[in-house]
Amino acid sequence: IGIRGATAFNRWRFVRSGDRTEIEVRPAVETNDAEVLRGMTVAGAGLTVLPDYLAEEDLAAGRLVRILDSWALSRVPVYAVYASTAGLPRAAREWIRAMKNALSAQAPRSETPRSLRRAASHRVVRQSRAH
């Protein structure tokens, strides 16, 4: 199951102990809504990549299971785009700093809010056979 229009997710890039592999994904079903993507996966429509924060409740309840858990997904670039730092509200600057920390492999995790740390991690999941 894929995200419509997200060409960055047409290839799943995995890393494990220095080994890298890439899989081209041709989703049979696509959506532009991450909650719909989660729901379709829980319903058994296929497998997908979900951010941890979206999958954690279903994983804990056994509705979803992680697959390829020994492999890590490569990071996808994320950009904060704004016209100028002049006049940028403090809250926006703090949010950008927190997101940079959350998405940086070198960032001190203690400086990153827990909710953002979860948002920075993704897993390949499928429906649990038990549900």
Image: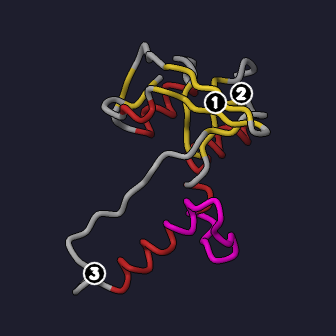
Residue at image position (68%, 72%) is: 108
**Highlighted range, magenta:** 100-116
The colour scheme applied to this rendered structure is secondary structure
Q: What residue type is labelled 3?
A: Thr
**Residue 94 location (% of width, % of height):** 44, 80
Q: In terms of sequence position, does the residue under pointer 2 or pointer 1 come before the other?
A: 2
The amino acid type, in three-letter code, at marker 2 is: Ile
Asked whether 131 or 7 is in front, the reply is 7
Residue 118: x and y, percent? Answer: 61, 56
Q: Residues within 10 Å of mark 2 (few under 14, many from 20)?
A: few
Secondary element at image label 1:
strand
Using the numbered discs, state the Cα–Cα distance from disc 2 to disc 3 in whole angstroms.
Answer: 42 Å
* Label placed on residue 67: 2
- SS state under label 2: loop
Residue 54 left/right relative to 128: left
Q: Position of residue 68 (x, y in %)?
A: 72, 28
Residue tagged 3:
85
Q: Which mark is residue 125?
A: 1
For the view shown, which residue lies furthest in the front direction? 18
Q: Do the residues labelled 2 and 1 touch (CB within 8 Å)?
A: yes
